Amino acid sequence: MICPTCGKEIEDGALVCEYCNQEFTYEEEAVEDAAKVEVVEDDAVVANQPSKVLAIIALVCGILSLAGNIIGLGILSPVFAIASIVLAVVYMKKGGVDGKKMAKIGMILGIVGLVLFVIVFVVSLVVGIGLVIFATATGALEDILWEVFGIRM
Ligand SMILES: [Zn+2]
């Protein structure tokens, strides 16, 4: 069978990997079934954990992304959003356990922050274009340009 921790070929039914010392437990009646190998939680697994700091930064970026939409951080908001999503995905892909909840919350806040930014951006654009079209149609644009900017159309 293949050691799920280090990936080296080891003896079927081995209780410990001879290469990385990973210990294994087996389903009672399926000792030969390598697919049912359960990795024992031990120091080796904990040592392979990605830094919890990654999850904390993901959470902070998620909060900043969402808050950025409210306090008007502009283009920084989607930057924080993408950072929180990427960091959370990296943390979880590396098998992070301790900070998984923080990473997940950070990712959700980042996604909400990103969606909110896109909505605000699109609405502003539509309202802006709408106002210009409305002002042009009613002749108000010429008045505004003349009175505010001194431009004659
Ligand atoms: Zn191994």
Image (tube, rainbow, N blue to C red):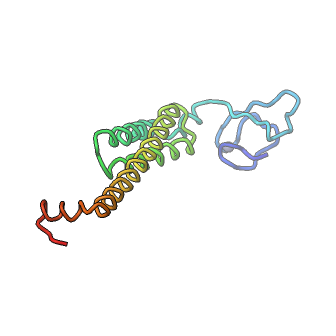
Ligand 1 sits in quadrant:
top right
The residue under the point 35% across, 47% down is: 77
The residue under the point 28% across, 39% down is: 71
Rendering quarter of residue 130: bottom left
The number of numbered discs placed on residues in the rendered structure image is 0
Q: Identify whether 105 is placed above or below 87.
A: above
The residue under the point 49% across, 33% down is: 99
Q: Is residue 41 left or right of residue 130?
A: right
In the rendered image, residue 43, in percent from the top left (x then y), is placed at 57, 31
In the rendered image, residue 78, in percent from the top left (x then y), is placed at 39, 50
Q: Is residue 101 left or right of residue 139?
A: right
Q: Is residue 31 left or right of residue 46?
A: right
In the rendered image, residue 89, in percent from the top left (x then y), is placed at 52, 45
Can you name the residue that lies furthest to the bottom here?
A: 153
Q: Identify whether 51 is placed above or below 120.
A: above
In the rendered image, residue 67, in percent from the top left (x then y), is placed at 34, 38
The residue under the point 80% across, 43% down is: 11
**In front: 1, or 101?**
101
**In front: 36, or 149?**
149
Q: Is residue 50 left or right of residue 9?
A: left
Quarter of the picture holding the C terminus: bottom left
Q: Identify whether 80 is placed above or below 24.
A: below
Can you name the residue that lies furthest to the right here?
A: 29
**In front: 110, or 20?**
110
